[in-house]
Image: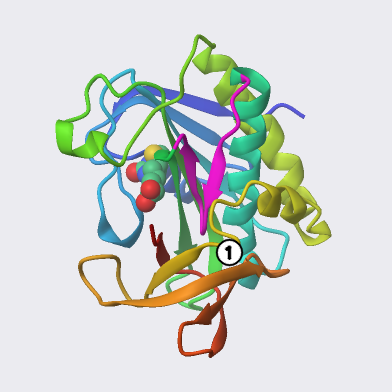
Amino acid sequence: KSLPIYVYKTVDSTNNAAKKLAVEGAEHGTAVFAFHQSHGRGRLGRSFLSPANTGIYMSVLLKPSFDIRRSVLVTTAASVAVVRAIEKVCGLRPEIKWVNDIYLYGKKICGILTEAITDFESGQIQNLILGIGINCSTNEFPKDLLEIAGALEGSFSKNELAAEVLNQLLPLIEHLEDRTFLEDYRGHSLVIGKDIQVYKGGYAGTVPGRGASALGIDENGGLIVQYDSGERETLATGEISIRL
Ligand code: BTN
């Protein structure tokens, strides 16, 4: 089935553009791409630098047939879709830092931001907007960002990669409950078996971290941790860093 794809030269955020389309009745699977975002958003209130023509900035509207409590799994599936697409189109082997940051050679090259549209009256989540930003060049990045952010390398077609992300993503979402992609997620995990810091209610620098080791990923995409105190917990979502 062919699905609508909108391509904009510049938008504030493709997640906002997709939200507008959702309100206008756009169908499940509608995708929005932009060459530039003036106000790209990241998780936890951060911004996502989106200079013109240096990355793939995309959002996909999902009208879930699945239980909405599974929306963390959607983001987990999206990480796997991005990793598979990069492997296929670029021949690189990226890794996933829980929850859903994609890394290459120790630097973040892609972030994923899932936002929910809730019905004002019922408070029910109706739609999900899955936003994906992939850095394809660091040319326009300020120096301080270069310490943590990287980009894909080599020559490849951005169009092909963008299309492949969609092709990988939609079937995974259709069969979310299969959870077969979790094996791939675990296989690409940057954190399993590592010593980490867990930040609750914020991120590094804003809340104190708690030392733990990352034991594994559970069936809902949650991170199973054992704190230095010995106590175990499964985190549904959140922010961690890897202890060096
Ligand atoms: C993060 O790393 O915290 C998530 C970054 C998500 C960035 C993408 S780019 C396309 C979409 N539009 C946005 O404003 N954000 C997401």
Q: Residue 105: where, in percent of width, then height?
A: 46, 34
Farthest residue to the front: give it.
244
Q: Which residues are magenta?
A: 91-105
Q: Residue 29: where, in percent of width, then height?
A: 63, 40
Q: Name the foreground residue: 18 vs 172.
A: 172
The number of numbered badges drawn on the structure is 1
Identify the residue at image location x=54%, y=68%. 125
Q: Is residue 225 left or right of residue 50?
A: right
Instruction: Say which quarter of the image contains residue 76.
Output: bottom right
Q: Residue 88: where, in percent of width, then height?
A: 68, 23
Residue 49 higher or lower than 100, as above or below: above
Instruction: Say which quarter of the image contains residue 202.
Output: bottom left
- Label 1: state its secondary structure: helix
Q: How is the image coloured?
A: rainbow
Q: Residue 145: where, in percent of width, then height?
A: 22, 38
Identify the residue at image location x=55%, y=27%. 5
Pointer 1 residue = 72
> Is 97 a magenta residue?
yes
Identify the residue at image location x=60%, y=50%. 62
Identify the residue at image location x=21%, y=70%. 206
Q: Amino acid at mark 1?
A: Val
Q: Name the foreground residue: 94 vs 127.
A: 94
Farthest residue to the left: give it.
143
Residue 182 higher or lower than 69, as above or below: above
Residue 99 higher or lower than 11, as above or below: below
Question: In which quadrant of the rendered image does the N terminus lie?
Answer: top right
For the residue carrying disc 1, how many other residues have a C-alpha within 10 Å: few (<14), some (14-19), or many (20+)? some
Ligand 1: image quarter: top left
